[in-house]
Structure formats: structure tokens, C-alpha cells
Amino acid sequence: MKDSVRVAVAQLTGVSGDMESNLTSAEKMIAEAAGRGADILCFPEYYFIQPESEPVTRQTTRREESRVLSFLREMARKHGLWLNAGYLRGRKSAYFNTSVLVSPAGRVVGRFNKVHPAPNEAVLAGSDYPVFRTELGTIGLLICYDVWFPEAARMLVLAGAEIILIMADVPAGRGGKSALPGHPISDERLNWTTLATARALENDVFVVVADRVRYRPAGGGSMGGSMIISCDGTMLAQASFQREDLIIADLDGRARSAWVDAYGHLRHRRPRTYTGLTKRALPAK
């Protein structure tokens, strides 16, 4: 990868059912990130259109895909930076939750369909983990619930990923209810931060998380707390858990090379002992 890559994350809420307002807010973030020298800007999951705002149909997904892609291509060319964002990609009567990577030339160089839809998410599941070789480095994409499955990030890194971009819309809080009867309420912010940091540290890779934010004091909404994490687990930048935000950090490619040379955890893998991972699954609930 490049010796230095300046990454920006736009932590936004999105106005339900108002695509034009969301595009206007996104353009302001893009202009600010470009003005601060960012090489790439990442947006949250479900920012441009929200499933809670209107019924999702083949017509709405096609309209969204066309509008969002046109916008991203135009903005990437205008401001000369890479963009990562998502939309619902319709196919017949169903659709994928898709993350795209757009180059400064306005070309879509990569797409990833969420492999692990959340239990309450009515989307098709993707089936592969592509990586994209760019001038910034080799980039892999994941979406929200994919982070809970360490195999997903590992597949990307084994394919050569040096940077993993994760767009997310993480549910925030349970309104004061514990997940387990008789147990104290877990710190969900810490849980999410720990998961993302683990994916970086166990894979010697940079992890960038763009999370949607919808703060509600009584619980619910979306968590926020977007992150840029170094390959050694250092938190380079983290956004607010309560408001929209723009965070920026520099990824040091030379430092990553030194880290991998010194520690290189993946060199110590013993794949023959892991074959059971693809042969065993918990019974369906």
C-alpha cells in the first residue's frame, strides 16, 4: 500500500425518506474531507435511503441505485478522491445490501454484497469476499453484522487486503434492558469497539468503520462511534456516539510493513487444524 493514506469517515444520520437532503449533507462532507486532504471518504450503511423510511420495492431500489451511483461518480470526479458508500441493489423481487468503491475517475471499481444479513434484515445474502487493488492499497469491504464473524475479515486478508472498510448501522441500546436475565447491562459501545479492534489486530490490517448515528437517550437508534483503527489495534480516531461527525486519520503503510515483518500473526496459522469450520454449524433456531 501507499506509505500514507489519509482516510475520512462521514458519520451521518440521514433524513428518512428525503434522498435530496441526504445527498446535500453528503456533498458537504465530501467537500470538507477533500479540503482536508483525504484520499478516501467512507459513508455509513443505510444512510442514503433507510428501510424504516419507506417500503422497499424493486422500483425504489432501482431508483436509489441509479441516483446514488450517479452522485458518487460525480462527487469523486469533482473532488478527486475515493468514495465508499452503500445502497440497496434490487434483483427481481429481492435485493442485496451493497457496498461500492468509487475511484477519483468516477469509476465503480468494486462491489460487495453483505454476506451476513442481520436476523431482522430482509435482504439476500452475498456469497464472496472480493478485494480490490487500488493506488491506495488493496481494499476489502464488509458491512455491519459481517464483523461478528471473524472468518469474513480473515478471508479478505488472505486474499491480500491491507485496509478493510466497514459501513454499519449498529443498533444502539436496549432501553435499559439487559440482554441476559439476571446479568448487568453490557456496554454495547465497548462490545462494538472491541469487535472492530480485534478484526484489525488479529489480521495485521487497518480497519475503518463508518457507522450511522441516531442518538436517543432512552435507547434505540443507531450507535455512532465510527472508528479508524491501526493494524496494531491503536484507535487512530473515533467519532461521537451522539452526533454527526467527520473523523480523519493517516494510515502509515510503512509502519504496517514493519509490524507485519516483526509479528506477522498470519505466518503462524495452522490451516489444517481449522477444517472443521466449514463442516460444522449450529442447528437452525
Image: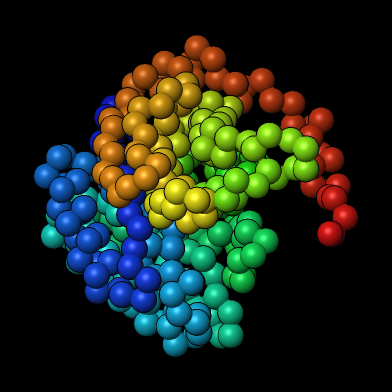
Residue 18 seen anywhere in this rendered image of the structure: yes
Q: Quadrant of the N terminus?
A: top left
Residue 169 seen anywhere in this rendered image of the structure: no
Image coords of residue 2 (percent x, y): 30, 32
**Is the residue 200 above or below the residue 71 in the image?**
above
Image coords of residue 63 (percent x, y): 37, 82
**Is the residue 68 above or below the residue 195 in the image?**
below
Question: Quadrant of residue 225 in the image?
Answer: top left
Foreground pick, 215 / 4: 215
Foreground pick, 216 / 76: 216
Task: Report the side of 232 relative to 83 (left or right).
Answer: right
- Number of numbered discs on residues: 0
Foreground pick, 96 / 9: 9
Q: Quadrant of the C terminus?
A: bottom right
Colour scheme in the image? rainbow
Please give the name of the residue rendered at 30% of the width and 74% of the height, measured from the top-left corner: 19
Please give the name of the residue rendered at 37% of the width and 19% of the height, measured from the top-left corner: 255
Image coords of residue 264 (percent x, y): 55, 20
**Is the residue 65 above or below the residue 74 in the image?**
below
Image coords of residue 188 (percent x, y): 57, 39
Please give the name of the residue rendered at 28% of the width and 32% of the height, measured from the top-left corner: 249
**Is the residue 113 above or below the residue 40 in the image?**
below
Please give the name of the residue rendered at 45% of the width and 79% of the height, measured from the top-left corner: 54
Task: Report the side of 249 relative to 269 (left or right).
Answer: left
Outermost residue to the top: 262
Foreground pick, 121 / 176: 176
